[in-house]
């Protein structure tokens, strides 16, 4: 335990080293940029050469990388304008050497950094925290997303599964490429006061093919923040006049047909029989703007046949694995329902709805209301599911309210969730929270929640069913940054629609980091050093449960390669057997201290061949562990992506003569011959379950809201003799065709 005083002494040294590293690079928002209004004359063809465009002033772009604040090396003529129906943005994007242009990918919402990008985010309510984002590449693909929480955690706070109605066209020329975006105001939610509408805009051009990948933005932003081009708080305020809100109605029916097959043990228990079940179903969604700030979504017989399958994982921890939501209905406007207790824990976890023990449960339907009422952000959700096996039919409800206070990026709010079984069971959870921007990049976050359920002794002022978080953080990547938190989870806390990776614990956790940006001549774009630690006790017994400390160095090069090296030390007290790797090994109760090292590396994604590698090696409880993961990816022309994933986990407890080795192989393929057609394949082999799992999806998407899906899911057993009677080769398969068309009124 001598490491603790040394660790905290270094923490204190770093704080005093740069205690005055304050401030924010937010642009001056006191003078909104008035957007030029046009009366017509734009031919939407991807070439902004009409007289209407000539009357609009170009926006000044500033380099974000590789030299923050520098002058762009390429010509970018970016303009914005609007008329009664649309918001337009255009770009003439030239190159000194056309060979630097990379046009890769055509799939809707293609996420890769290997292609050129041009796009923008719109903070439509000018709340400096939430936004919608629109991107394209030289091939004219459409990529849109929503942003929440000022994109503090990019993979979580930027939701790429959100889709809305908009258009973009591009043209490739000898000098580069050009683009025109056309965003209907009916697809945006905004507030108008005295005939004026204020929004925030942040425009970005990204060119990975140059010797040093270049990104330019309007307005200029600082790399003191992680992913600054995704942050609404750094956007420039723009002003529209005379916008007239419209309230369109979208009706999107679907029809689905196919067959499901599964091999089931026969009545005699002597073998397996293939049972086939045809499927023919229909349902649909309705979207209606109650007001320009408030949207109603209704769904009937909700279906998620086209949703991508979860990745295969092996659990080597004491805690539950977290799987992200991938169903579009729950992803849309999901930011309003966030009530985050960090480390994946949340008061609301939408995967509790329509899923039970890994099986899909029919959702009869439901509704959702999201938007603003006055100064309040509002989110309401209600869904009804059917009975599945021993689980009764259930009703799920969520109500979330938030309101800005004190300053921008500060709010107070509350949430209530309910899970009501048709057999009379119930679970309620409720909480209050607040986020306060104290000064510069310093934030204080406070959240408290409590749960109540049938057959429990529910008391309002009781810590047993309670959850608490107090968090103070400085959100800065350059100079000093820190994150101090205290977490508490009571013995009886059980949010029925929430997620808890660990239960019944309390204690502090801290991270302190210091980041540098080397000079212009350096090959490094950014690197940082961090120290972190946590110490948790069990809230029931009061005994120590787990302690962890880590020392890390992270770097990113100007060619977009990056990685980290981390040294970890853990102290674990187990009161029960710990089961690892799908019941392949156990660790008996006791106290364990062990250390390991983790190395991560990602090569530049701007190249046709790229890869990510991770290595974990060291002691593991009373044994040792070696884990390796590799994910090479190859791009062939503009139409094909191939990805391989491989993970190896070897765990050995030599004193107890116990060990196991697990392999997971994965193949991902993507073919996009045009922006309308895509074919995705995901094939996994997991030795822990001796099974091959395949998910193949074909999509025809000629326009937003018009989709044809063909989906094939297959599961194959690989070790047929592991059970008696002998297992069949095919565990099960599903073949489905789904067609959706959206009517707009």
Image (cartoon, rainbow, N blue to C red):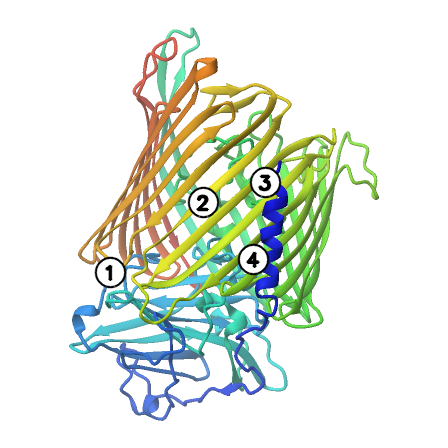
Q: How far apart are marks 1 and 2 (CA)?
A: 34 Å
Residue 248 horizontal/vertical position (percent): 51, 69
| Total labels drawn | 4
Q: Which structural element holds mark 4?
A: helix
Q: Which residue is drawn at 43% across and 57% down?
A: 160
Q: Distance between the residues labelled 3 and 4?
A: 39 Å
Q: How far apart are marks 2 and 3 (CA)?
A: 16 Å
Residue labelled with disc 3: 3
Label 3 or label 1, whichever comes before in sequence order: 3
Residue labelled with disc 2: 566
Q: Looking at the image, do the residues carrying marks 1 and 2 touch, with CB atoms under 8 Å apart?
A: no
Label 1 or label 2, whichever comes before in sequence order: 1
Above or below for 182 versus 736: below
Front of the two marks 2 and 4: 2
Q: How far apart are marks 2 and 4 (CA)?
A: 31 Å
Q: Residue at x 58, y 20 (%)?
A: 577
Label 2 or label 4, whichever comes before in sequence order: 4
Q: Distance between the residues labelled 4 and 1?
A: 30 Å
Q: Which residue is drawn at 36% across and 10% down?
A: 271
Q: Looking at the image, do the residues carrying marks 3 and 4 touch, with CB atoms under 8 Å apart?
A: no
Q: Residue at x 30, y 21 (%)?
A: 718
Residue labelled with disc 4: 335
Q: Which structural element holds mark 3?
A: helix
């Amino acid at each position: 335990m001598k490491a603790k005083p040394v660790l905290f002494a270094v923490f204190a040294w770093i704080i005093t080293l740069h205690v005055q590293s304050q401030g924010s690079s937010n642009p001056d928002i006191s003078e909104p940029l008035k957007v030029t209004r046009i009366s017509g004359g734009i031919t939407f063809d991807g070439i902004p050469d009409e007289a209407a465009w000539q009357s609009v002033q170009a926006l000044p772009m500033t380099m974000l990388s590789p030299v923050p604040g520098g002058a762009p090396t390429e010509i970018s003529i970016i303009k914005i304008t609007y008329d009664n129906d649309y918001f337009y943005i255009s770009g003439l994007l030239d190159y000194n050497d056309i060979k630097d242009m990379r046009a890769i990918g055509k799939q809707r919402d293609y996420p890769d950094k290997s292609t050129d990008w041009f796009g923008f985010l719109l903070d439509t309510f000018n709340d400096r925290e939430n936004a919608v984002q629109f991107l394209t590449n030289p091939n004219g693909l459409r990529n849109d997303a929503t942003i929440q929480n000022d994109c503090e955690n990019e993979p979580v706070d930027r939701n790429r599964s959100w889709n809305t109605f908009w258009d973009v066209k591009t043209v490739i020329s000898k000098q580069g490429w050009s683009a025109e975006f056309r965003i209907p105001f009916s697809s945006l939610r905004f507030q108008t006061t005295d005939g004026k509408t204020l929004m925030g805009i942040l425009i970005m051009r990204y060119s990975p093919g140059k010797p040093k990948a270049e990104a330019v933005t309007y307005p200029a932003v600082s790399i003191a923040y992680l992913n600054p081009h995704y942050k609404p708080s750094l956007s420039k305020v723009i002003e529209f006049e005379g916008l007239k809100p419209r309230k369109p109605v979208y009706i999107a029916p679907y029809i689905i047909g196919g067959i499901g097959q599964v091999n089931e043990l026969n009545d005699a228990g002597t073998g397996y029989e293939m049972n086939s079940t045809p499927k023919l179903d229909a349902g649909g969604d309705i979207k209606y703007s109650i007001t320009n700030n408030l949207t109603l979504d209704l769904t009937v017989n909700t279906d998620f046949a086209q949703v991508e399958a979860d990745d295969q994982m092996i659990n080597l921890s004491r805690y539950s694995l977290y799987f992200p939501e991938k169903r579009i209905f729950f992803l849309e406007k999901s930011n309003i329902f966030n009530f985050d207790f960090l480390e994946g824990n949340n008061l609301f976890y939408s995967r509790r709805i329509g899923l039970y023990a890994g099986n899909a449960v029919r959702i009869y339907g439901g509704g959702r209301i999201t938007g603003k009422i006055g100064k309040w952000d509002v989110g309401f959700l209600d869904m009804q599911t059917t009975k599945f096996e021993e689980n009764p039919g259930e009703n799920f409800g969520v109500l979330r309210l938030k309101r800005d206070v004190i300053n921008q990026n500060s709010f107070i709010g509350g949430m209530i969730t309910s899970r009501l079984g048709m057999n009379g069971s119930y679970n309620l959870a409720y909480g209050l929270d607040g986020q306060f921007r104290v000064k510069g990049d310093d934030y204080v976050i406070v959240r408290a929640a409590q749960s109540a359920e049938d057959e429990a002794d529910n008391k309002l002022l009781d810590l047993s069913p309670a959850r608490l978080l107090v968090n103070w953080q400085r959100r800065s990547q350059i100079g000093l940054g820190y994150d101090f938190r205290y977490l508490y989870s009571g013995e009886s806390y059980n949010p029925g629609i929430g997620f808890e990776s660990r239960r019944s614990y309390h204690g502090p956790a801290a991270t302190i980091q210091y980041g540098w940006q080397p000079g212009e001549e350096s090959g490094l774009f950014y690197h940082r050093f961090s120290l972190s630690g946590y110490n948790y006790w069990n809230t029931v017994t009061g005994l120590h449960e787990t302690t962890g400390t880590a020392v890390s160095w992270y770097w990113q090069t100007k060619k977009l390669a990056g990685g980290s090296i981390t040294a970890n030390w853990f102290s674990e007290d187990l009161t029960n057997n710990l089961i690892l790797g799908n019941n392949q090994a156990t660790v008996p109760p006791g106290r364990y201290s062990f250390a390991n090292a983790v190395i991560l590396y990602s090569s530049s994604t701007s190249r046709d061949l790229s890869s990510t590698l991770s290595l974990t090696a060291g002691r593991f409880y009373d044994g040792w562990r070696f884990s390796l993961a590799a994910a090479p990816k190859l791009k062939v022309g503009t139409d094909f992506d191939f990805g391989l994933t491989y993970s190896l986990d070897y765990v050995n407890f030599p004193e107890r003569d116990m060990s196991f080795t697990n392999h997971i192989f994965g193949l991902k393929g993507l073919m996009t011959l045009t922006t309308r057609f895509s074919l995705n394949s995901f094939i996994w082999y997991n030795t822990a379950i001796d099974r091959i799992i395949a998910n193949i999806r074909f999509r025809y998407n000629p326009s937003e809201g018009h989709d044809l899906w063909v989906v094939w899911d297959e599961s194959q057993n690989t070790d047929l003799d592991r059970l008696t009677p002998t297992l069949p080769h095919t565990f099960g398969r599903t073949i489905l065709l789904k067609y959706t068309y959206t009517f707009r009124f």
